[in-house]
Image: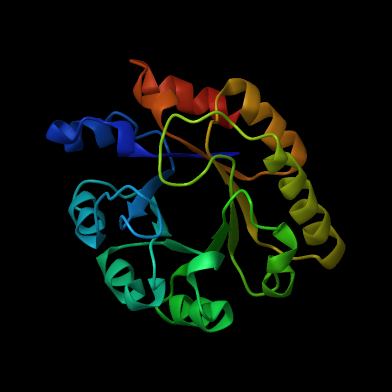
């Protein structure tokens, strides 16, 4: 699997050093929150631009924001490789997917834990990645929700049956034990935050997670 560290729990007073401490990770996950779609508020596209000056990782931007269509261009021109929006925040998901791709950026879609996975069925042929939230979005350090495994299995079965090529990403409560479970269910990418940043040997943890 690909391990995409989420640096939200890192020390922002020495952000460059924190990012360089996970340079073995191929991807970097940006948790973008607006204080409206989710209670917490984080940073905006300027963080993507800043980190692009010292990182060449794949930038995986998760927009937990309302009206995401208004902000796609900002993230695309700032260096995003993937832009993931929430089904619940989009008025027209198909149009938004096309807009993201028009910037030569991969399009991802996510749903909250209580949203039925079947709502994505008609979008799967057009999407590059589906992000399954295994915690309620907007707050780090939550426990993994086992219901996420059913959603991963559902997506993986549809992907195999229809020969789709979207990635399945999982975010929330990922550690060595839950990483094994989501891998078995069919996940391709795991987002890991505090579990990595509370360790001193961060790059070793990343490599272990990728090979559970």
In the image: residue 49, left or right of residue 188: left
Location of residue 202 (image quadrant): top left
In the image: residue 164, left or right of residue 21: right
For the C terminus, the quadrant is top right
Name the residue nearer the viewer: 20 or 153: 153
Location of residue 146 (image quadrant): top right
User: x and y percent of residue 118 in the render?
Assistant: 75, 63
For the N terminus, the quadrant is top right
Name the residue nearer the viewer: 28 or 92: 92
As drawn, which residue projects farthest toward the left? 13
For image coordinates 61% across by 48% down, the residue present is 113
User: x and y percent of residue 75 in the render?
Assistant: 31, 66
For image coordinates 39% across by 71% down, the residue present is 68
In the image: residue 136, left or right of residue 114: left
Q: Is residue 105 above or below residue 195?
A: below
For image coordinates 71% across by 30% down, the residue present is 181
User: x and y percent of residue 34 in the render?
Assistant: 31, 58
For image coordinates 41% across by 62% down, the residue present is 81
As drawn, which residue projects farthest toward the right? 161
Q: In this view, does 191 lie above or below 123?
A: above
Taking the image as drawn, is residue 212 in sight? no
* Count of residue discs: 0
Name the residue nearer the viewer: 42 or 62: 42
User: x and y percent of residue 66 in the render?
Assistant: 39, 67
Taking the image as drawn, is residue 138 in sight? yes
Q: Which color mode does the image show?
A: rainbow
Location of residue 5 (image quadrant): top left
Q: Is residue 138 above or below residue 119?
A: above
């Amino acid at each position: 699997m690909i391990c995409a560290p989420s640096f939200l729990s890192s020390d922002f007073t020495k952000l460059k050093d924190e990012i360089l401490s996970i340079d073995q990770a191929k991807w970097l996950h940006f948790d973008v929150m607006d204080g409206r779609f989710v209670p917490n508020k984080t940073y905006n596209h300027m963080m993507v631009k800043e980190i692009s000056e010292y990182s060449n990782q794949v930038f995986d931007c998760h927009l937990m924001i309302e009206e995401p269509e208004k902000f796609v261009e900002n993230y695309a021109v700032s260096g995003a490789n993937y832009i993931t929006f929430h089904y619940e925040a989009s008025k027209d998901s198909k149009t938004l997917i096309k807009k993201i791709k028009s910037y030569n950026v991969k399009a991802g879609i996510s749903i909250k834990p209580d949203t039925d996975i079947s709502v994505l069925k008609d979008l799967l042929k057009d999407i590059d990645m589906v992000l399954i939230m295994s915690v309620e979005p907007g707050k780090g350090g939550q426990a993994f929700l086992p219901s996420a495994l059913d959603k991963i299995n559902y997506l993986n079965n549809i992907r195999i049956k229809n020969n789709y090529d979207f990635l399945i990403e999982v975010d929330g409560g990922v550690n060595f034990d839950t990483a094994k479970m989501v891998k078995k269910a069919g996940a391709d990418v795991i987002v890991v935050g505090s579990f990595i940043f509370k360790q001193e040997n961060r790059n070793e943890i990343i490599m272990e997670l990728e090979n559970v």
